[in-house]
Image (tube, grey):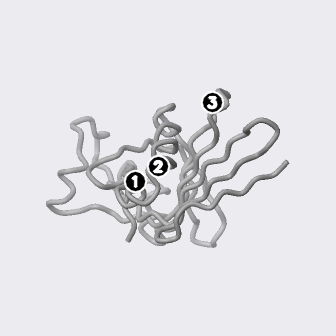
Amino acid sequence: MATWQRFEEEAAELAAAVRVRFGAGRTHVLATLRRDGSPRVSGTEVDFRGPDLSFGSMLNAVKARDLLRDGRCAIHAHPYGDGDGDAKVAGVAVEVAGTERATYTTGSEPPGGFHAFRLDLHEAVLTQVVGEELVISVWRPGRGVRVHRRK
């Protein structure tokens, strides 16, 4: 399992840039898989708790049911037009339960309960326009950062 902390340890500069992108907006786009395998996109908020990137869902929402059935997902941080790039993370959502769940509560949970998830991070990507080039920085656990440039 790769935590956000591992990402920071293996690729500190990229992790910081990706975190800035997620911090630039309150809501982001979560992609999950429907029962038939087709994609579903939903809004979500992310937080950085302990060593993890975490996010939640209202109790029994369709995105939560998707994640409980098949945890594969991606989260996209909106590029708000400021030129700092576009960040995405992908991995497997793992529901946080029991005593560990107390770490993921903020006191402002939605009425009726909620699901708390942490992301087992499989990939982080930052896409930026630098001068005349599109620069795509990709991190995967244990592989370091690979940078692809396109004109």
**Label at residue 15:** 2
Amino acid type, mark 3: Tyr
Few, some or many residues within 10 Å of mark 1 (<14, 14–19, 20+): some
Q: How far across and down, in percent of the image, does residue 107 sit?
A: 21, 37
Q: How far across and down, in percent of the image, does residue 24 sit?
A: 50, 31
Say which of 98 and 51 sits in front. Answer: 51
Q: Are marks 2 and 1 in contact (CB under 8 Å)?
A: yes
Kindly report the distance in space between the C-alpha atoms of the residues bearing marks 1 and 3.
Answer: 24 Å
**SS at circle 1:** helix
Amino acid type, mark 2: Ala
Q: How far across and down, in percent of the image, does residue 55 sit?
A: 39, 49
Kindly report the distance in space between the C-alpha atoms of the residues bearing marks 2 and 1.
Answer: 5 Å
Q: Residue at x 24, y 39 (%)?
A: 106
Residue position for label 3? 80
Say which of 142 and 39 sits in front. Answer: 142
Of the image marks 3 and 2, the number of the one nearer the N terminus:
2
Relative side of 135 to 108, left or right: right
**Label at residue 8:** 1
